[in-house]
Amino acid sequence: MELVKKEGRKVDSVELVEKYLKDESYKDALIIQSGIIGLSRQFLHNEGFVEYLPVIVSTITDPLNRDVFEAQIDYYGHKYYITKSMIVQKQVGILVHDKIFSFSPNLRLEREEKAQSGRHLIDFVQLDLEVKNAKREDIMSLMEDLIIFVINNLLQDHSELIKKYHPGLSVPKKPFNRISVKEAKKRFGDDYEKIISEKSTEPVWLIDMPIEEREFYDKQNPLEPDTLLDFDLIYPEGFGEGISGGEREYEYDQIVKRIKLKGNNLDSYEDYLKIARKGYLRPSAGCGIGIERFTRYIMGLEHVEKTRLFAKVPGQFSI
Ligand code: AMP
Ligand code: MG
């Protein structure tokens, strides 16, 4: 596997260790992150979810909606992709248990420009969940409850620590505001996501993405066919997108139509299409919440790099 296509900046390993020992914010962010992981798990177990171990390599992975370098491993004459998300595995997973989640490590070889966003790593973890027969509303409500549960408990258990970094953090109120992409573009122009995030003091749902702007697996809205039954959560105070999710396509003909619409190659999805063709897939909805971005928002940090040790910043090369 080729990790960088051009010469990335090599980070000195000893300098990195010295930074971790000197800058207390790494230590503090990891305490909060450990709390986020434990509390999310507790919340989902209480809601009847089963935790699946993550899938790291697969014959098929998320095409993503944007351009990242491919990460493949040759193995006995076949190609394994390193998973960019567990979307395909989740759609099969809900056939076995109705409510599932994984802390899923994803590799997305983002371009170096993304280093400036404050939100991108090439190796990150999302809490990826899916629920059989659920609607978009169910997942949005579930995630509001999860976020409120996590922040509420962290503010009780680590109030001094959070106050030190993000004194303005409060528990968001349910239901979070929502706005469609069409409406957002009308009101704020093309930079709507950034503007909404910067002017908000509470998380906001962005819903109804235009069909051509998202991957094939988010379900087309039958009542408004140029939009999808999906959503993003935008964190307030400029922290940007933190969750993406939606209802899923599960019918073979519709999946094929959507893959073609995106200009993707049907052959790359053969293992998945075979399952769909047999009629095994069922309606579901789900989402992924990035753990580093959730930590960054709660701690009010400049960059997700601050939320873990050995973070892989786009364009850099480190231990
Ligand atoms: P996506 O479905 O592509 O939006 O990914 C799900 C979630 O994972 C996003 O909402 C983010 O919280 C997180 N995420 C996606 N890409 C990255 C990245 N390059 N670095 C850190 N977190 C990410
Ligand atoms: Mg997204």
Image: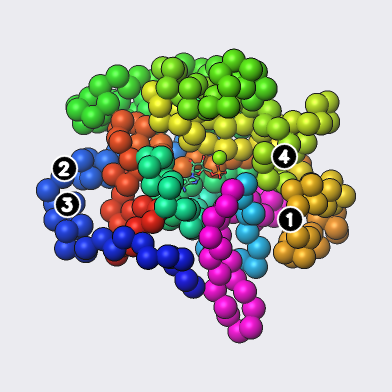
Q: In the displayed image of the protein, which residue is found farthest to the front?
A: 6
Could you say which is closer to the camera, residue 9 or residue 137?
A: 9
Q: Secondary structure at mark 4?
A: helix
Name which residue lies at 30% across and 57% down.
Answer: 310
Q: Looking at numbered disc 4 in the image, what kind of residue is underneath it?
A: Glu
Does label 2 or label 3 sit earlier along the sequence? 3
Q: Is residue 166 left or right of residue 182?
A: left
Q: Position of residue 114 (x, y in %)?
A: 43, 46
Dot in front, 2 or 1: 1
Report the residue marked by disc 3.
19
Name which residue lies at 78% across and 60% down.
Answer: 266
Residues at marks 4 and 1 touching, judged by CB atoms closer than 8 Å: no
Classify mark 4: residues with Cα within 10 Å, few (<14), some (14-19) or many (20+): some
Report the residue marked by disc 1.
264
Classify mark 3: residues with Cα within 10 Å, few (<14), some (14-19) or many (20+): few
The disc placed on residue 24 is 2
Report the residue marked by disc 4.
212
Q: Looking at numbered disc 3 in the image, what kind of residue is underneath it?
A: Lys
Residues at marks 2 and 1 touching, judged by CB atoms closer than 8 Å: no
